Image: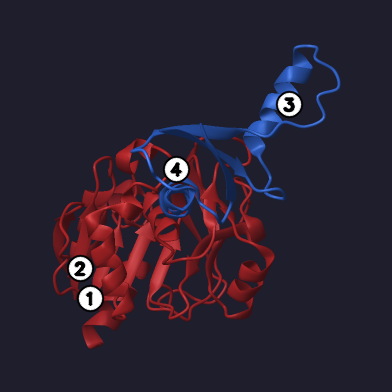
Chain colours: A blue, B red
C-alpha cells in the first residue's frame, strides 16, 4: 500500500519561503497571488495493513515537527 | 570535568568543540552517533555542522540516532548538555529544549560575527559573564530563526531561561532569542559559536568565559 504525507507549516507560523515565492510570482507578472505556503510531500511505500494510526505515529515522531508543522495523511 | 562530544555524519564543529573544552582542562572523548553508550561524563556537547545533510529538517535525523537516546538518558539523570548551532537544532528536535529553529527570515545563510546580550547569568554556562554584558560571537547558519508558541515564549521569559539574545536580529528569531536553557538550567542550546571564539589567533576570545565557567562549576560538582 502507498500513503502520502503532506507536511505544512501551521497556520500562524510565518513561512518566509512561501513569501519569497509569492514575491517572485508577482515579479513574473502574475497578479492576484494573495498568499503562498510551501510544504513537502512524503510518499511512503508500506506493508499492506499498515494503519493510519501507525502512519500518524511516524509523522509525530519523525516526519513532521509538530511544534511548527501540521500534517495530513492520504492513503491511496 | 569529563565531557563527550557527539560526532554525526556531517558534523563540522566537533573538533573545534573538543579543542575549546580541552583548552580549559576538560577530559574530552568523541562519541560516534551509532554509540548507544556515552559513558560517565559531566557534559555532553552536541556540535555544529550539517548532520545527515540537514535531510528532512535540520537535526531531525540526528535526533533519532542511537546516541541521542543516550543523550536523553544523560539529561534525565541531571547531566549537563550544550548544543551549538546544529547542536541546538538537534536539542529542539529531541524535545530536550522547547521550540524549533526555522529557516532564517531573510532566507539567506548568514555567516558573520554578531553582538549578543548575555540575558541571564543564572546557569553554569553563563555565570562567568556579567549580567547584560554585550559580547560578540560568530554565527553561521541558514536555520536559526527561533520559533515557539506564545505560552512557551512566556514561560522562557518568566523563568529567566533566555540565555542570549541578538543585538541586531538578523534571522527573525522571536524575542531576538539566540540561546535558551532547559527547565533545570542544565541544558543550553545556542545558535552562535562560542567554540569558534576561544583562541586569540582568531581575534576573538569571547567564548572562553563560557567554557571556563563550565569547567570551574562542574569540577566542583
Numbered disc 1: secondary structure: loop
Q: Pinpoint the chain carrying mark 2.
A: B
Q: Residues within 10 Å of mark 1 (few under 14, many from 20)?
A: many
Residue B3, numbered circle: 2
Q: Which mark is residue A22?
A: 3
Q: Residue at x 28, y 44 (%)?
A: B11
Which of the marked residues, 4 or 1, is nearer the chain's N terminus?
Answer: 1
Q: Quadrant of residue B209?
A: bottom left
Q: Dot 1 corresponds to which residue?
A: B42
- Mark pair 2, 1: CA separation: 6 Å
Closer to the camera, B44 or B220?
B44
Q: Residue at x 63, y 52 (%)?
A: B168
Mark 2 touching mark 1, by CB under 8 A? Answer: yes
Q: Earlier in the sequence, mark 2 or mark 1?
A: 2
User: Label 4: which residue?
Assistant: B57
- The residue sitting at 85% across, 17% down in the picture is A31
Query: Where's residue B101, x and y in %?
Result: 52, 51
Q: Position of residue B170 (x, y in %)?
A: 61, 46
Q: Are marks 2 and 4 on the same chain?
A: yes
Tell me if I can see residue B221 in this picture.
Answer: yes
C-alpha distance separating marks 2 and 3:
47 Å
Residue A31 horizontal side relative to residue B217, left or right: right
Which one is nearer the viewer's eye here, B109 or B78? B78
Q: Is B125 located above or below residue B196 in the figure? A: below
Q: Are marks 2 and 1 on the same chain?
A: yes
Give the distance between the C-alpha atoms of the residues marked 2 and 4, in whole angstroms: 27 Å
Residue placed furthest toward the front: A49
Q: Quadrant of the C terminus of chain B?
A: bottom left
Distance CA(mark 3)–CA(mark 4): 23 Å
- Helix, strand or loop at disc 2? strand
Amino acid at each position: 500500500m502507498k500513503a502520502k504525507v503532506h507536511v505544512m507549516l501551521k497556520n500562524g507560523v510565518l513561512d518566509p519561503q512561501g513569501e519569497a515565492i509569492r514575491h517572485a510570482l508577482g515579479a513574473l507578472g502574475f497578479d492576484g497571488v494573495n498568499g503562498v505556503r510551501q510544504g513537502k510531500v512524503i510518499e511512503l511505500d508500506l506493508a499492506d495493513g499498515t494503519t493510519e494510526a501507525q502512519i500518524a505515529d511516524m509523522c509525530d515522531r519523525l516526519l513532521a515537527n509538530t511544534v511548527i508543522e501540521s500534517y495530513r495523511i492520504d492513503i491511496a | 570535568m569529563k565531557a563527550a562530544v557527539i560526532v554525526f555524519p556531517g558534523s563540522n564543529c566537533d573538533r573545534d568543540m573538543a579543542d575549546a573544552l580541552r583548552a580549559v582542562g576538560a577530559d574530552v572523548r568523541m562519541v560516534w552517533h551509532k554509540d548507544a553508550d556515552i559513558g560517565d561524563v559531566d557534559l555532553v556537547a552536541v556540535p555544529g555542522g550539517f548532520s545527515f545533510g540537514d535531510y528532512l529538517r535540520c537535526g531531525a535525523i540526528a535526533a533519532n540516532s542511537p546516541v541521542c537516546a543516550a543523550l536523553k538518558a544523560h539529561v534525565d539523570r541531571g547531566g549537563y548538555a550544550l548544543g551549538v548551532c546544529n547542536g541546538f537544532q538537534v536539542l529542539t528536535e529531541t524535545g530536550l529544549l522547547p521550540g524549533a529553529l526555522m529557516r532564517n527570515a531573510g532566507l539567506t545563510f548568514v555567516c558573520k560575527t554578531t553582538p549578543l546580550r548575555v540575558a541571564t547569568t543564572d546557569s553554569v554556562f553563563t555565570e562567568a559573564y556579567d549580567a547584560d554584558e554585550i559580547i560578540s560571537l560568530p554565527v553561521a547558519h541558514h536555520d536559526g530563526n527561533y520559533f515557539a508558541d506564545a505560552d512557551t515564549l512566556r514561560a522562557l521569559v518568566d523563568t529567566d531561561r533566555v540565555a542570549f539574545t541578538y543585538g541586531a536580529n538578523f534571522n527573525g528569531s522571536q524575542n531576538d532569542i539566540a540561546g535558551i536553557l532547559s527547565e533545570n538550567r542544565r541544558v543550553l542550546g545556542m545558535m552562535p559559536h562560542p567554540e569558534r571564539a576561544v583562541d586569540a589567533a582568531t581575534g576573538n576570545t569571547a567564548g572562553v568565559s563560557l567554557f571556563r565557567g563550565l569547567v570551574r562549576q562542574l569540577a566542583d560538582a
